[in-house]
Image (cartoon, rainbow, N blue to C red):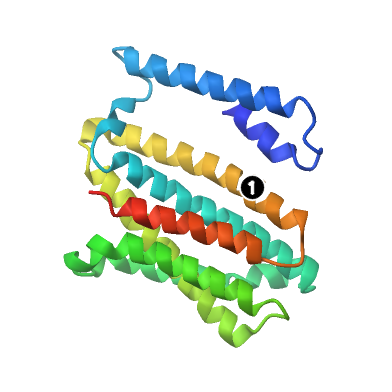
Amino acid sequence: MGALVVPLVLGREQHWPLWTWPSIATGCVALTIFCVHELRTPSPLLDLSVLRRPFITPGLFASCAVMGAYTGFLFTLALYLQNVLGFSPLHAGLTFLPYTAGFATAGLGWTRLPPAVRVNLPAWGLLTFAAAASALALLTRDGWPAPLAEPLLYAAGFGHAAGFSPLVDRITGAVGPAQASSVSALTNTGVLLSNVHAIAVLGGVYLSGPGTLTHVTALLAALLVLAAAASRHR
């Protein structure tokens, strides 16, 4: 994990020195060896056989993808607000309050929805997140239209929670108590890696041509659409 994460965190600002690529390659090889060992040993640290269960792999991908999309969105939008629109760090931070409110609304309320609605909630939530983020990128080219931006941030946060929380609940409920810890470990580890990759990729795209969120949002929306499709697997 360290061999994978460190070069992705430090590589861009150091202009990708030669050590970053052997480190990433070493991390990939070590991770492969670890997975093969865990599948063969009778007492694994991480029970990877859980990935053979229906829905677990696409569900994990969708869960990690939405968290990566959120991290990339938060990182690039915070830079855009401060470096392009001239917001102070405090002002930029407070700007995300509607997002937090939307996330709290869906995160606390989705379990009260009828079962027929909860079945399709992850897909619709992720698509809502993608649509709101895309609209926000288009509207903020010439400034920050607060009356429009705040509802869009609320919708993005609502879609984030509506897409993530039911997915985690679903994949955890799809396995028995004996494998619940393995699902939890895979979810947390996958979220960490997706967050780092999102900042490296989406942040790199933004910093390569600062001044617009359009290119970043296009990648973010594509990732969320893939996650929405994965969440539809049974």
The spot of residue 25 in percent (x, y) is 62, 23
**Furthest residue toward left:** 115
Which of the image's four quarters has the N terminus?
A: top right
Res 87 quadrant in image: bottom right
Tell me if I can see residue 98 in this picture.
no
Residue linked to disc 1: 201
Q: Determine the residue positioned at 67% across, 66% down.
A: 213
Q: Determine the residue positioned at 49% across, 74% down.
A: 154
153 versus 122 height, above or below? below
Tell me if I can see residue 232 in this picture.
yes
- Residue 92 lies left or right of residue 136; in this view the side is right
Quick one: label 1, few (<14), some, or many (20+) residues within 10 Å? some
The spot of residue 50 in percent (x, y) is 28, 31
Res 38 quadrant in image: top left
Q: Which of 176 and 196 is in front in this view?
A: 196
Q: Determine the residue positioned at 69% across, 22% down.
A: 22
- Residue 231 lies left or right of residue 92; in this view the side is left
67 versus 175 height, above or below? below
Residue type at mark 1 is: Val
The spot of residue 26 in percent (x, y) is 61, 20
The spot of residue 145 in percent (x, y) is 65, 84
Q: Determine the residue positioned at 34% across, 44% down.
A: 58
